Image (spheres, grey):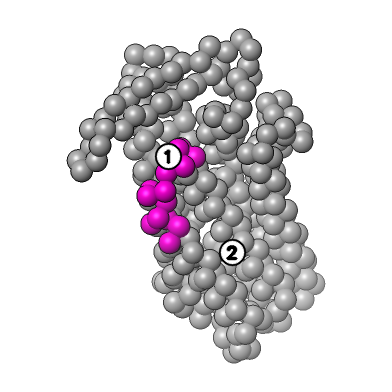
């Protein structure tokens, strides 16, 4: 069995595992969402969040179903040369569909990242300029990757996709996630310093840990795809692009289980009747900027 066929079969098994994990996490988040906001949600931000999570779930699910279809079809071909030719045909509808779904999932995941950045920095515009430019470049490059796949020649293989479009897309995504995670972590770290003597210090420490873990998960997957294409590792390319949608979904769910349903929407939700809000004001001098006041209002959290 060739490395290409083996890589696709391994990718299918890994995607099944990651999709199962993602599905369990999603059901848990929807249950918590229902307890906190109700379904359908009464406030607009919560409704948009739930709708976005559902759209991402549908895209990832269709990708997983399409992968299962390709795997069953490949097994029926017998696993020989015919199977390898099938997997190397980049212009086949099932491959183009999976590439399109992977690109859409990637864009949705980075859109969630930008939304977190926008909310945590109190709708600040200056901090959004650089990541939005990278995100727009990612969208254009993603469209180029899909077009490149759909119009590929029969004698081209998967390695030929390591072109400028794909490289630009992956690098732009890495810049978005790295920049956003860094400045969000910096923001939370500054607030933690003010809460050092309060009970909320450990809560923010846990929040920061989940942020970092989710960002590492997403960025590592993107770097894995980029490295596989650049170093011409054929089987690795199929594996990384195959599992990417489910892994991106997991990274999103891990974040929104803690932030999207709790702290990040603190200004949009009504606190529980028995909650005692804590208000902390932090003043910090930064070079070249006026004093900034950060206000964190926390409640009793998920209950």
Task: Answer with the quarter of the image where residue 102 lies.
Answer: bottom right
Most prominent secondary structure in the magenta stretch?
A: helix
Per the image, label 1 sits on a secondary structure element best described as: loop
* Residue 77, above or below 261: below
Report whether 154 appears left or right of 126: right
Residue at position x 46%, y 67% from top? 137
Residue 247 point in image, percent of width and height: 57, 51
Query: Is 69 displayed left or right of 28 in the figure?
Result: right
Looking at the picture, tell me which residue is in the foreground, 74 or 116.
116
Give the magenta part as a residue range. 119-134
**Displayed quadrant of residue 134:** bottom left
Foreground of the two, 205 or 261 = 261
Residue 178 in sight here: no
Cα separation, mark 2 vs mark 1, equals 27 Å
Q: Earlier in the sequence, mark 2 or mark 1?
A: 2
Q: Quadrant of residue 93?
A: bottom right
Relative placement, left or right, of 80 versus 111 is right
Q: Position of residue 182 (x, y in %)?
A: 36, 44
Which residue sits furthest left? 287
Q: Residue 13 location, x and y as percent?
A: 66, 56
Locate the N terminus and report the quarter of the image it occupies: bottom right
Disc 2 target residue? 103
Location of mark 1 (residue): 121
Which residue corresponds to the image point at 32% horizontal and 24% vertical from the top-left? 282
User: Circle 1: is it few (<14), some (14-19), or many (20+) Cα within 10 Å?
Assistant: some
Task: Verify whether residue 124 appears in magenta.
Answer: yes
């Amino acid at each position: 069995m060739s490395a290409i066929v083996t890589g696709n079969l391994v990718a299918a098994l890994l995607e099944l595992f990651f999709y199962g994990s993602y599905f369990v996490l999603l059901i848990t988040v929807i249950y918590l969402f229902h307890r906190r906001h109700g379904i359908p949600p009464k406030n607009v931000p919560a409704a948009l969040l739930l709708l976005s999570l559902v759209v991402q779930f549908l895209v990832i699910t269709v990708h997983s179903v399409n992968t299962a279809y390709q795997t069953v079809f490949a097994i029926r071909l017998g696993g020989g040369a015919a199977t390898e030719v099938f997997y190397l045909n980049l212009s086949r509808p099932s491959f183009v569909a999976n590439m399109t779904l992977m690109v859409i999932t990637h864009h949705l995941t980075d859109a969630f990242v930008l939304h977190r950045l926008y909310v945590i920095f109190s709708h600040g515009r200056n901090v959004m300029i650089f990541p939005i430019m990278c995100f727009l470049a990612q969208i254009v490059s993603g469209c180029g990757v899909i077009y490149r796949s759909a119009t590929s020649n029969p004698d081209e293989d998967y390695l030929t996709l390591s072109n400028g479009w794909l490289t630009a897309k992956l690098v732009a995504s890495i810049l978005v996630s790295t920049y956003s995670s860094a400045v969000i972590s910096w923001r939370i770290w500054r607030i933690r310093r003010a809460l050092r003597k309060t009970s909320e210090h450990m809560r923010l420490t846990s929040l920061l840990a989940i942020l970092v873990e989710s960002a590492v998960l997403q960025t590592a997957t993107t770097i894995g795809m980029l490295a596989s294409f650049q170093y011409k590792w054929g089987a690795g390319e199929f594996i990384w692009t195959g599992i990417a949608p489910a892994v991106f979904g997991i990274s999103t769910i891990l974040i929104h289980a803690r932030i999207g349903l709790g702290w990040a929407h603190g200004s949009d939700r009504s606190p529980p009747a028995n909650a005692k809000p804590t208000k902390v004001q932090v003043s910090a001098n930064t070079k070249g900027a006026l004093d900034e006041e950060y206000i964190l209002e926390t409640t009793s959290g998920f209950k």
